[in-house]
Image (tube, rainbow, N blue to C red):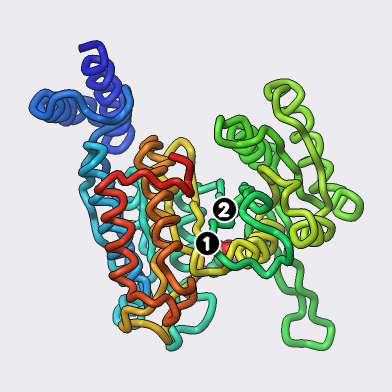
Amino acid sequence: MCGLVGSVSASFFNRVRRMGRRRGLLWSGWIQCVGVYEEVRARGRPSGKIGVRMRYDIAVLPGDGTGPEVVREGLKVLRAAGERAGFSCDLHEYDFGAERYLRTGETLPDSGVEELAGNDAIFLGAIGHPDVKPGILEQGILLKARFALDLYINLRPVKLYPGVETPLKDKGPADIDFVVVRENTEGLYASTGGFLKKGTPDEIAVQESVNTRKGAERCIRYAYEYAGRPDRRGKLTLCGKTNVLTYAWDLWWRAFNEVGEADYPGVTRDYAHVDAIVMWFVKNPEWFDVIVTDNMFGDIITDLAAMIQGGLGIAAGGNINPEGTAMFEPMGGSAPKYAGQNAINPLAAISALQMMLDHLGQKEAARWVEAGVIHAISRMDSLAAGKMGMTTSEVGDVVARHVAEGAVTEEAGW
Ligand code: IPM
Ligand code: MN
């Protein structure tokens, strides 16, 4: 009984808070909340933990190329996880991407941003099309969403699963298990700078790195919190360039140490220059637990990290505003060559979905999905598109079935 009351009231407060924030109408939160109460009463005690919500609004952006195929498999797994954990999702699909752009000239309009903001999370397939000039969709959709929704954390777990091939000699799953927390709204991505005397022999181009104390600190705090999670090892490495970029990294260095000293004494602090960290990723990846870095360095080091965890078929990421919405995506891109062939690997999208569940507080469901991914890997010939020994939808079926059946996966340890 206690659990039921706890669950209802937590949902109640979440719902009221969120609806209030979204629409500025407290009473609509009331109505929603009564709905949640009825739902819980009708179903009996939910299997989720006390305080875990039972219904989510999810924006779905299948996007271009193979995006829709991998999103479809992700949603299959989401449904299985929801049925087992006792939560449901209202899916809201949007067609932002190359086709819409080619048809209408629109990338992500302001009204779209507003609609996305009303969701608990956004599930993105891929954007990119051979007929669209590089940069337009990246700037117009991905970067616009990051900035407009203030998705200031870019989270990239880097984990080598059993049976996945890594190019690193003599390294296995015990050695490659870290998380990169990349600042996602500032630095060189802030788009400040300009040209002088453009097009002349005296042309000057300036591209500035913008680092605010607030921006660095909120990212650093998120990383400390992450390093303190029970499933991490309590070590946080700042990845910077304090020896050359002496303004930006002085600010980061001070924020990192001050915040750590004052509020996270239980987390071990560590530092590595960015040029050294790429060396250590290859030689000693086992040194790393959680890494925090700026936007540009994070962009670069996470691509190397994707390769050591088995490639783009498995790498997933999240663009997160811890106080607002968050967008989860596979890192692989739209792979137009494989579009429509049922040959692309959906595991990165399914892993992105796992991150989404973890972010939404459905921790147990997230672990089931991870167990399903590990199980699927054990049955696949390869993670590479067209060489999996299974189709895209078969891989999704294997994961979804595993999640639905709740089979214990020894490899994952639960
Ligand atoms: C990433 C991508 C993006 C970035 C591009 C597509 C704008 O490379 O998410 O890492 O540079 O951040
Ligand atoms: Mn990148």
Q: Residues within 10 Å of mark 1 (few under 14, many from 20)?
A: many
Helix, strand or loop under label 1: loop
- In which quadrant of the rendered image does the C terminus lie? top left
Residue 155 at x, y percent in the picture? 55, 49
- Report crowding for label 2: few under 14, some 14 to 19, many 20 or more residues within 10 A (C-alpha): many
Specify the quadrant of the image occupied by residue 103: bottom left
Q: Up-down: is 255 above or below 188?
A: above
The CA distance from mark 2 to mark 1 is 8 Å
Which amino acid type is marked by label 1? Answer: Ala
Q: Position of residue 310 (x, y in %)?
A: 58, 66
Image quarter where ligand 2 lies: bottom right
Q: Is residue 173 left or right of residue 101?
A: right
Estimate the x, y position of residue 292 in percent, counting from the top left: 68, 45
Is residue 4 depicted above or below 94 in this figure?
A: above
Kindly state the secondary structure of the residue where label 2 is placed. strand
| Residue 110 appears in view | yes
Image quadrant where one finds the N terminus = top left
Observer able to see residue 20: no
Drawn side of residue 75 relative to residue 191, left or right: left
Residue designated by label 1: 315
Q: For residue 305, which quarter of the picture? A: bottom right
Position of 184 relative to 307 (above/below): above
Residue that label 2 marks = 156
Q: Residue at x 63, y 38 (%)?
A: 223
Badge 2 residue CB within 8 Å of ligand 1 = no
> Looking at the image, which is closer to me, 372 or 50?
372
Lateral position of residue 241 relative to residue 106, left or right = right
**In the image, residue 125 lies at what x, y percent?**
38, 66
Three-letter residue code for mark 2: Arg
Q: What residue is shown at x 57% (from left), y 31% (from top)?
A: 229
Circles 2 and 1: CB atoms closer than 8 Å = yes
Q: Nearer the viewer, residue 239 or 197?
A: 239
